[in-house]
Amino acid sequence: MRTDARLDDLLRRQAPQILGALVRRYGHFEASEDAVQEALLAAATQWPEHGLPESPRGWLITVASRRLTDQLRSDSARRRREDTTAALVPPDGHVTPAPDDEDPSGRDDTLTLLFMCCHPELTAASQIALTLRAVGGLTTAEIARAFLVPEATMAQRISRAKQRIKAAGSSFRLPPEPERAERLRVVLHVLYLIFNEGYTATSGPDLQRSELTGEAIRLTRAAQGLLSDDGEVAGLLALMLLTDARRPARTGLDGGLVPLAEQDRGRWNQEAIREGIALVTEALSAGPVGPYQLQAAIAAVHAESPSAEDTDWAQIVGLYEVLERAAPNPMVTLNHAVAVAMTRGPQAGLDMLATLDADDRMVDHHRLDAVRAHLLEMAGHLDAARASYRSAARRTTSLPEQRYLEARAARLTGTT
């Protein structure tokens, strides 16, 4: 059954909160996730016909709890032992809230769920993958593309992560210091990936998925409230705000992609820009400086530029040089090459891109071809630029990006 976009958005926002409530109350991470998926399916089937319940979250918690306890009772009978969570549900199926959850619609466990998914028993890659699945609501295919690995590989990684969480017997509560600070590094990276998937969707008909960017910003604010003196939390929140501020200008009336240089900056969200600049300015002054603060500083330079022509590219190059030393990454090099091309000419940028040709993480990525096409066009190598645009269009699974890249290639042939 198909649901409308508003209901899809509501269910996506509720999913991690319902999962967090069940795991806190009952444990059984994997079984709880299955129960939540069944409750979401029931909502998608019933709500369009009967209307939204007074408390959508309370409805989902109740239905998911019933599904979970039914399953646990069945497992208990088969294993000839009782499960303590079954005692929470009387024979009539009414869900009795846990003592610390008198109002099931009033508590948000999403941040605690984030930290649980970043359990130290998991590898860093598994922590990120599991959190993207359980909290971010991304599909396994979307996560696989973010990690540049096959979907089957990612499915196995997520399944193993769930089993390790179960075996570790992790309690559902925020970790103590200093473990909390260490896990926060992974939490921030997860939020960064969720935001990126929302800002530029890796697949599908839409360029942006505002429900993901909104959730990433909300969770990052929650993390900042937890560790308000952490400069990287503030840096990440600033980066998200400054980047998301461009969202109203990133698409045209037809939904097509509008590149940064061609955007109407009058449509940028000035309130978000002011907040982002204030956050990164304070964080940079407090030190030490981390990668998210540096990326936010780059975004701030763009935000403060009245036009693309007035952008202080020399300052951006300097910030990218510091960022590459602090956090080497092929995507950083890719963006650095664009800034270098704007200050030293397209050939200098192309030379920097050439260093990525042997990088297995980038060799088949459409963005490498897209940036190369842009720099080749700047250099006047139109045939080569056209070929690179077409190669990038073939590799992307985002329809708006594909249309944009094909249009760039067509323009170089003089066609429409």
Image (cartoon, rainbow, N blue to C red):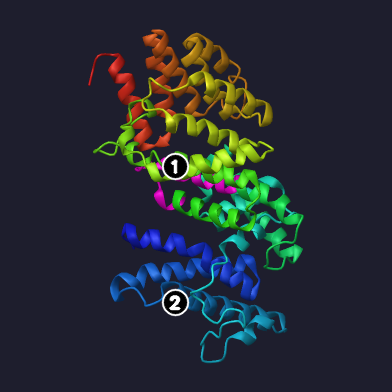
Q: Quadrant of residue 101?
A: bottom right
Q: Is residue 151 left or right of residue 10?
A: right
* Residue 208 in sight from this viewpoint: no
Q: Give the percent coordinates (x, y) of residue 57.
A: 45, 72
Instruction: From this view, report whether residue 229 is shown above or below residue 63.
Output: above
The front one of 315 and 12 is: 315
Quarter holding the N terminus?
Answer: bottom left
Residue positioned most to the bottom: 91
Instruction: From this view, report whether residue 15 is shown above or below residue 51.
Output: above
Q: Earlier in the sequence, mark 2 or mark 1?
A: 2
User: Which residues are the magenta region?
Assistant: 189-212
Q: Give the percent coordinates (x, y) of residue 313.
A: 49, 20
* Disc 2 from disc 1: Cα separation: 39 Å
Instruction: Find disc 1 in the rendering and name its residue.
Output: 274
Instruction: Find disc 2 in the rendering and name its residue.
Output: 59
Q: Amino acid at mark 2?
A: Trp
Q: Quadrant of residue 118?
A: bottom right
Residue that appears at 33% across and 37% down: 249
Instruction: From this view, report whether residue 26 is shown above or below residue 399.
Output: below
Quarter holding the C terminus?
Answer: top left
The front one of 196 and 354 is: 196
Q: In the rendered structure, does residue 317 fall within the stretch colored magenta? A: no
* Residue 55 in sight from this viewpoint: yes
Q: Give the percent coordinates (x, y) of residue 302.
A: 45, 30
Residue that appears at 46% across and 71% down: 39
Residue that appears at 66% across and 36% down: 289
Q: Is residue 407 left or right of residue 26?
A: left
Q: Quadrant of residue 266?
A: top left
